[in-house]
Image (tube, helix red, strand yellow):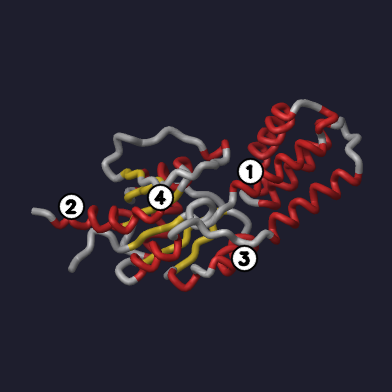
Amino acid sequence: MTRNLTTIGFDADDTLWQNEQFFRLTEERFVALLGAHGEAAEISGRLLDAERRNLAFYGFGIKGFVLSMIETAIEITKGEVKASVIGEILTAGREMVAHPVETLPHARETLAQLAGDYRLVVITKGDLFDQERKLAQSGLGDLFHGVEIVSDKTPEMYRRVFARHGDGPERAMMVGNSLKSDILPALEAGAWAVHIPHELTWALEHAEEPTGQPRYRRIPRLSALDELVRLIEAEAAAP
């Protein structure tokens, strides 16, 4: 049978396993460290500004987050931050890197349902070392035909990845929790895109939902993906 879909791409962080919650907990710890120098909302806002500025230099992931925390600490204390505070920030970053991977409910079952019929590809952005570590610890690596760890997610990136691992974006689907990174650029590339909202989403990943796009779908949980894929295939095969 000729399939309408041949390749399915999966975001990793907060789609297959928990991620943002560890950043939030570390941010709370950071804010408490600098509590004598400002209100919590102000410190968090300054940190977000630093993260936004630094994306072009450090990319996505824990290392850039730690460097942004250090930069924010220096700015807020007007250069008088204690070495012990810098040490605690570095320790917090190492603890994030060492934290065990917590896969989201039904991740393995859903991937196993689809792996026999489709080429599954991890498409994630962030630090190469950390993303490779998390995939290895997740126990999900054997279900994927390919892994792409990229610096950013753009329409051109999706075109290249889906051409390399499948039959191009027109016969591919991207699944993820970020409207900005997983959904909008995949749709622009010509792929299907399935949004699975996560309760925590980084502020820099927020975007408007593309409700009018015919190739856009939203499901409440990963376990609903197999049924959705079969429905899309059935609709495409209907006369």
> From mark 2 to mark 4, how far is it between C-alphas?
22 Å
Residue neighbourhood size for the residue with mark 3, other residues' Cα within 10 Å, grouped as few (<14), some (14–19), many (≥20): some
Q: Dot 2 lies on which element?
A: helix
Q: Which residue is mark 1?
A: 55
x%, y% of residue 113?
Answer: 34, 66
**Nearer-N-terminus badge (3/1):** 1
Q: Residue at x 56, y 53 (%)?
A: 18
> From mark 3 to mark 2, how far is it between C-alphas?
39 Å
Left/right of residue 49 with respect to residue 212 in the rendered view:
right
Q: Amino acid at mark 3?
A: Arg
Q: Amino acid at mark 4?
A: Arg
Q: Residue at x 45, y 41 (%)?
A: 179
| Residues at marks 3 and 1 touching, judged by CB atoms closer than 8 Å | no
Q: Which labelled disc corresponds to residue 221?
A: 4
**Nearer-N-terminus badge (1/2):** 1
Q: Which residue is mark 2?
A: 235
x%, y% of residue 134?
Answer: 59, 63
Q: Nearer the viewer, mark 3 or mark 1?
A: 3
Left/right of residue 221 with respect to residue 1 in the rendered view:
right
Q: Dot 1 lies on which element?
A: helix
> From mark 3 to mark 1, how far is it between C-alphas?
22 Å
x%, y% of residue 60?
Answer: 61, 49
Q: Dot 4 lies on which element?
A: loop
